[in-house]
Amino acid sequence: MLFVLSLDERARVLYCLPIDRHPGANAPEEFMVLAHEPSILLVDDSADDCFFTMRALADLGLKHVSRVVDSASGAVERLAVGDVVLVLLDWHLPGEDGPDLLVKVRDAAGPAVAIIVLSGRDDEEVRSAAQAGGARAVLAKPLQPDALRPLLPSVLAALAGNAPA
C-alpha cells in the first residue's frame, strides 16, 4: 500500500492518506507518494522534552509518532520493526550519549532513515560530531516547530524518492 502526503506552504502535513497506486506512477507535483505511512521515532529520556517535541510535531501536522523510547536499546528494538522514516534522537541518554549513541542508532536504522539529533548543547562540537555520524541536522531542545519546518520537505521528499537522501 502507498500513502500520499501533502504539505502546505508552511511545510505542515495537511494529510497522509492510503492510496491504491502503482509504485512507478507519477504523483502530482504537490503530493509526495510514500511506500508507507510516515512514522517517527522519538528517543528521549526527558518527559518534559518529549512533551515539547510532541507538541512541535503536532503543530506541524505530524501525528504519526510511532513510539517514544528512552534508551538506545529501546530505539534499536523499535527500529527492527522497519517502519520508521525519521528518528528524533536526544544526544544524551543515560548510559550512552554522543557519537557512540548515534552510531548505534544509525546502524540499526539503516541509511534510508533520517536522523535528527536533539541537544541542549548548541555548539559546533555537537553539530560536527552528529553530522559526521550521519545525522541530517542538530536542533536545540526544547524543539520548536520553526526549527524543524525547513527540514521537512527535503526529509520527506527523500523518503518519497523525489530527492537524494
Image (cartoon, rainbow, N blue to C red):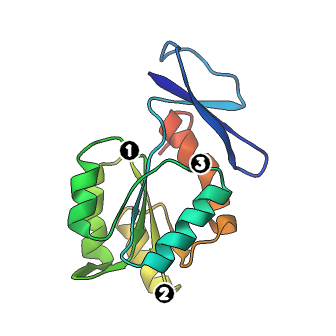
What is the x, y in percent for residue 63?
Answer: 55, 50
Residue that carries the numbered disc 2 in the rendered image:
121
What is the x, y in percent for residue 66?
Answer: 41, 50
Residue 127 seen by the camera = no
Q: Secondary structure at mark 1?
A: loop
Image height of 113 relative to 90, above or below: above
Specify the amino acid type for callout 2.
Arg
Specify the amino acid type for callout 3.
Ser
Whole-Å distance between the Cαs marked 1 and 3? Answer: 13 Å
Q: Residue at x 28, y 60 (%)?
A: 75
* Neighbourhood count class around disc 1 (C-alpha, 10 Å): few under 14, some 14–19, many 20 upward: few
Residue that carries the numbered disc 1 in the rendered image:
112
Lower position in the chain sequence, tag 3 or tag 2: 2
Pointers 3 and 2 in contact (CB under 8 A)? Answer: no
Q: Report the quarter where the N terminus lies.
A: top left
Question: On residue 154, which mark appears?
Answer: 3
Q: Secondary structure at mark 3?
A: helix
Residue 94: image quadrant is bottom left
Whole-Å distance between the Cαs marked 3 and 2? Answer: 25 Å
Q: Residue at x 48, y 87 (%)?
A: 121
What is the x, y in percent for residue 113?
Answer: 39, 49
Lower position in the chain sequence, tag 1 or tag 3: 1
Q: Nearer the viewer, residue 131 or 98?
A: 98
Image height of 150 relative to 96, above or below: above
